[in-house]
Amino acid sequence: MTTYRQPGVVVTDHHFPVPLDHAHPDGEQIEVHGRELVAAGLGDAERDRRPWLLYLEGGPGFGARRFIGRQAWIDRAVREFRVLLLDQRGTGRSTPANRQTLPLRGDAAAQAAYLTHFRADSIVKDAELIRRRLTGGAPWTVLGQSFGGFCAVHYLSTAPEGLERVLITGGLPSLDATADDVYTAAYPRVRRKNDAHFARYPRDAERVRAIAAHLLDHEVTLPGGGLLTVEAFQSLGILLGSGDGTHQLHHLLEGAFVPTPTGPALADAFLEQVQAHLSYAGHPLYAVLHEAIYAQGQGPTAWAAERVRADFPEFDAAAALADGRPVLLTGETVHPWHFTTDPALRPLRETAELLAERDDWTPLYDPEALAANRVPVAAAVYHDDMYVDTAHSLETAAAIRGLRTWVTDEFEHDGVRAGGPRVLDRLLALSRDEL
């Protein structure tokens, strides 16, 4: 363990050995990292009396956010809890899985087999081992953001004895929707976000058309070696699901072109920013495992987002340009071409193909256990969440006994970041029936 200070908190880094495959606890071990935050100025006895709160980050594939001091919701949390920010297995400092490390496992088939142990079921089993080591067996509070909420619902399904309460922000999954169902619901939401953006920033519709037309006529390489195809450019629409994303997108688009001796060209500054938004170098599992988080024994996912996109021809950029229609941006979807355009993903193309073909994924949620739930649960559901379907979330909320929802249009999907202490305070009050 390493302990140091940041403004208002004492930080301790923990490293936990856990089984790669929890069905074989004496087999290969990997390491999971967690960062503990406690309020500065506590004595040892007072610190040890504090209950624990485990934070599960969104994703999949993202390590826990690196807060500095008491940023965002941390300020509220450390007034009451010892907080553990968990880097879920394969992310951050928890035995990272990426194009550099995965070849150590062997060929693509061996890599795909290895990555079957990196879904919510294994993450929750890691959490349970860690809980028993940290709390002496006492249950803890879990805060799950987005995919972290998916993990929390799995936790409720399989190990409720480890939970004091569960708080979920933008992360109530459908209990039975297939990947096809998820994307069939998603594309119309993304269309609404496009419409809202172009209504707010009317000139951006023409800017998007101009960029798309340029990309159809030119091969554009990003500074890091990625290819900026029309489809890759359209995927910048993922920004439209966050609270300030529409404004970020506008500022990005308005500086897209610069004059050059050979005519207008996409600006270096624009391409640098685009790369930062589109590269999966820092979170490759987000792409590799994204559709697997929806797989529950209903057959292979088989690149569901790509297949379902064909049912929504309004997202075809070339056709939109030909017809004089707005070119629509896309959202949280992963496609086979990502593994061609992005250098961080190219070496993992065959691995991703094997995972897309896999048809024996196990169920992640137990409806009977959730219907009998006795753990206090509160969930923030965002009214028109671009990333997680609101209707699916409310169906799940009704299926979990005792769950209390806060449905709001005040925030987008990243409300726990934007709302900070207020969102956490509201959920804690709901879970304690204090409202």
Image (cartoon, rainbow, N blue to C red):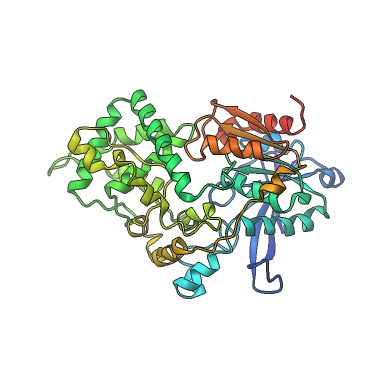
Q: How many marks?
A: 0
Q: Residue at x 31, y 35 (%)?
A: 253
What is the quadrant of the C terminus in the image?
Answer: top right
Q: Name the side, left or right, on which 31 lies relative to 193.
A: right
Image location (x, y in percent) of residue 204: 30, 30
Q: Residue at x 20, y 38 (%)?
A: 321
Q: Residue furthest left?
A: 262
Image location (x, y in percent) of residue 220: 24, 51
Q: Name the residue nearer the viewer: 233 or 41.
A: 233
Q: Residue at x 72, y 30 (%)?
A: 430
Image location (x, y in percent) of residue 367: 66, 47
Q: Is residue 192 above or below residue 38?
A: above
Q: Can see residue 259?
A: yes
Image location (x, y in percent) of residue 316: 27, 43
Q: Is residue 418 above or below residue 176?
A: above
Q: Is residue 135 above or below residue 18?
A: above
Q: Can see residue 61?
A: no
Q: Residue at x 44, y 40 (%)?
A: 186
What is the quadrant of the N terminus in the image?
Answer: bottom right
